[in-house]
Amino acid sequence: MSAHDHAEGLPHQPETATLEGRNKILGFWIFLGAETVLFGTLFSAYLALRHNVMDGPHPSELFQLPMVFAATMILLTSSLTSVFAVQALHTHRKNAMVGWLIVTILLGLGFLGLEIYEFSEYVHEGHGFTTSAFSSSFYTLVGFHGAHVAFGILWIGLLILQIYKKGLTTVTAPKIYVSAIYWHFIDVVWVFIFTVVYLMGKVG
Amino acid sequence: MDWLTTVDHKKIGILYMIAGLFFFLIGGLEAILIRIQLMKPMNDVVSADTFNELITMHGTTMIFLAAMPLLFALMNAVIPLQIGARDVAFPFLNALGFWTFFFGGLLLNLSWFANAVPDAGWTSYVPLAGTTYNDGHGVDYYVIGLQIAGIGTLLGGINFMATIINMRAPGMSFMRMPMFTWAIFITSALIVFAFPVLTVGLVALMFDRLFEANFFEAGNGGNEVLWEHIFWVFGHPEVYILIMPAFGIISEIVSTFSRKRLFGYSSMVFATVLIAFLGFMVWAHHMFTVGLGPVANALFSIATMLIAVPTGVKIFNWLFTLWGGSIRFTTASLFAIGFIPTFVMGGVTGVMLASAPADFQYHDSYFVVAHFHYVIVGGLIFGIFAGLHYWWPKMFGRMLNEGLGKITFWTFFTGFHLTFFVQHFLGLLGMPRRVFTYLPNQGFDTMNMISTIGAFLMGIGTIAFLLNIFITWAKPRNAAADSWEDGRTLEWTIPSPPPEYNFKQTPLVRGYDAWWKEKMDGNTEMTPAEPVGPIHMPSPSIIPLVMSIGLFIAGYGFMYDNLIVAGAGLLITLGGMFFRSVFDDHGFHIEPEDQDKGVHA
C-alpha cells in the first residue's frame, strides 16, 4: 500500500480541499462555457457552408464511416479511462491513477493518428484545405478539435511527470481533475462532430 | 520593475487605466482629425484613403482598446474590495489578461508605422476586408491584434465570474451584492459567451487572408453574410458588455450622492439579467437591409424593442433614487445625472432604429452615428468619467480637484451634445456615414461645422481631466477611508489606497449596503469575520509579460508569412505555460506584525 502512504492526510476529494482548488475548477467550467460557444460558432459556420463543395468530392463519397467510427470508439473509451483515473484520485491510489492517465494518453494518440491518416487520405482525394468553402470549414472545425486533443495529450503528459515529482497533493489534485473535465469536453465535442459532420454528411 | 511583474488587482487596475487612457487619447485624436476633415464641404485635410483608415482605427481603438480597458480598470480597482476579498480568483491570469490586451493593442496601432493601416471599418465586412479588395497587410493587423487582445478580455471575464461567485465575504449573498458587482458579474458572463464568437470570426477571416481558405470567398462557395452574422452575434452583446458596467457605476454614484438606498434594487438586478439575456437575440437588427426577409426582420425588431422595457425600469429606478434624496453635486454625481437624459435620448433613437421599415431610411446615415455615440459616449464614457472621479481617491489616495472636475464635466457634456445632436438631423437629411467629404449647399455645411466645434470642446474637457490628474499627483495622499463620507459599500471601510492585502480581517456582511448599515447602527467599523492572522499572498511573476510578448512575436510571424518567427513566438508562450504549470507558486505570508507597515498600493 505504498500509494496510500504517499497520500497521508489527504481529504477524500483533494481537488476541492483548498479555495485555490475550488477556484480552479469553477474557473475551468466557465472556460469550458466559452469553449462551447467557440465550437458552436465553428459548427454554425460548417453547417452554413457544408453544401458548397465546388469541384471537390462530396462528403457522402469522401467520408469512410468505419474508420471514423473506430476513432469515435477510441476517444469514448479514453473518456472512460480518465474517469477511472479520477476515481483513483479520490481513493488516493497514485499509481493506479497514473496508469489510467497513461492509458488515456495512449488512446488519445491513437485517435490523433487515425485523424492524421484520415486527413492525408482526403487530401489525396482532392479535398484540400483551399478546395472549397466546405473543405475550409471542415478542416477548421475538425482541426480545432484535433488541436484540442493534441494539447490535452501534452498537458496530461506533463501532469504525469509532475505527479511523479511532487506526489498527489492538494496542489496537484485540482490539476488532474481539471484536465479530466477538459478531456470529457473534447470527447463530447467529438460526439457532435461525429453526428453533425460525418453522419449528416453521409445522409445529407 | 514591480509593475511588470505585479499580480495585485489594484496595480493591474492602474495599468489598465493608464493603457486605456493612452488609447483613448489616440482614438480621440483620430476623431478630431475626422471632424477637421468634415468641418467644411470638399475639404482636403486628409485623403479619402487616410479617412477610411482613421474611421476604422477610431472605432476599433475606442471600443476594444479604450472603453474595454477603462472598464477593466474600474473592475479591477473596485470589485475585490466591494465583495470583501483579498484579490481576484486568479491573480496570475489577471496579469496575463492585461498584458495580452496591451500587446494586442500595440500590434494593432503599430500598423500606422508599418504603413498598412486597417481600412475596412471597425466591422471589417467582407468582401471589402477580403484579399480581393484589401491585399495589403492592413486588415491582418486588425485580425491578429484583436485576436491577441481578445484573449485578454476573455481571461478577464472568466476571472471576474469566478471571483464574484467564489470569493465573496461571509454574509454577502447574491442579493446583497452592490449593484456595480452585479453589473460586472453579468458583463463577465456576456464576455465569456460573446468573445469566442469573435475569435472564430477572426480566425476564419485570418485563414481566408493568410492561408487561402474560403469561408467568405463567394467564388469558392464562401458566404459573406456569414461574416455579418458572426460579427454581430458577437457585436451586439459587446455593446451590452460596454454599457452594463456603466449602469452599475451610475447606480452606485446616484445612490451614494442622493444618500439613499438604491430604489428597486431587486428589479435592478432582474433588469440587468434580462437585458443581458435579450442582448443575445437581437443581432440581426444590424442587418435589416441585408434582405433576411420580413419574418426575420419582424422578429428581431420586436426582440430589440423588448430591451427598452428593462432599460426603462433602470432609468425610473435611478430617477426614484434621486427623488427626495439630499443630492450632492460632485463631479461624479454630475456625470451620473448627466448620463440619465443623454442615455434616454440614445435609447429612444435605438427604438426608432429597431423598427425595420424605418431603418431602411436611417441605415448607414449619420442618424446611426448619432445614435451609437449617444449610447456609447453619452452612456459608457460618461459612466467611466463618473466612476474615475468617484473611485479615484480609493485608487490613489488623493481627491481629484472638484473645480477642474466640473470644468471637465461642463465642457465635455456641452461638447458632446454639440457634436452629436446635430448628427441626427444630418442623417435624416441624407448624409451617409463613412464618406470623406460632401458637396456644398446640401444643408450639411452649418451642422458639420457645429459638430466639429463640439468635438474640440470634448477635447478641451479631456485635457482638463488630464490636467486634473497631473495637479492631483503633486498633492499629498490624504484621502480618508470613506472619501465621500457617504460611502455605502465595503471599499469605503478600508484605507485609501488600500494595503496590499485589502482587508486585514475579512468583514462580516450583515445586509445590503453593508457599510451604510453598520454606520446606521452606530458602528465605526465592520464586524470582522475572522481573527487577525498571517495573510497568504500570491508571488509576483514575469511570466504573463513573457507569454504576451510571445504572442506578439507570433502575430508578426503569421502576418508576414514567416512561420519560423511565428513558431518561435508560440514556443515562448507555451514555454511560459510550461513553467507556470511545473513550478508551483506557493506565494508568501504577511505576518500580523508586518501588516500595519505596508500600507500602499
Image: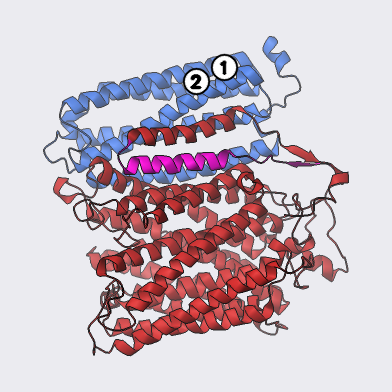
Mark drawn on residue B182: none
Numbered disc in front, either 1 or 2: 1
Pinpoint residue B499: horizontal percent, then vertical percent. Answer: 77, 53
In the image shown, does B129 or A120 lie closer to the viewer? B129
Residue at disc 1, secondary structure: helix
Q: Which residues are magenta?
A: B534-562
- Write down the chain letter for disc 2: A
Q: Colour of chain B?
A: red
Disc 2 crowd rating (10 Å Cα; few below 14, some 14-19, many 20+) is: many
Q: Three-letter amino acid code at disc 1? A: Val
- Write down the chain letter for disc 1: A
Picture quadrant where residue A120 is located: top left
Q: Is residue B554 magenta?
A: yes
Instruction: Check disc 1 and report the residue beneath it.
Output: A98
Instruction: Report whether A119 appears left or right of B386.
Output: left
Q: Residue at x 36, y 23 (%)?
A: A112
Q: Earlier in the sequence, mark 1 or mark 2?
A: 2
Q: Is residue A132 magenta?
A: no
Instruction: Check disc 2 and report the residue beneath it.
Output: A81
Picture quadrant where residue A12 is located: top right
Q: Residue at x 51, y 76 (%)?
A: B312
What is the spatial separation of the Cα atoms under label 1 and label 2, in whole angstroms? 11 Å
Picture quadrant where residue B207 is located: top left
Pinpoint residue A147: horizontal percent, then vertical percent. Answer: 39, 31
In the image shown, does A160 or B175 lie closer to the viewer? A160
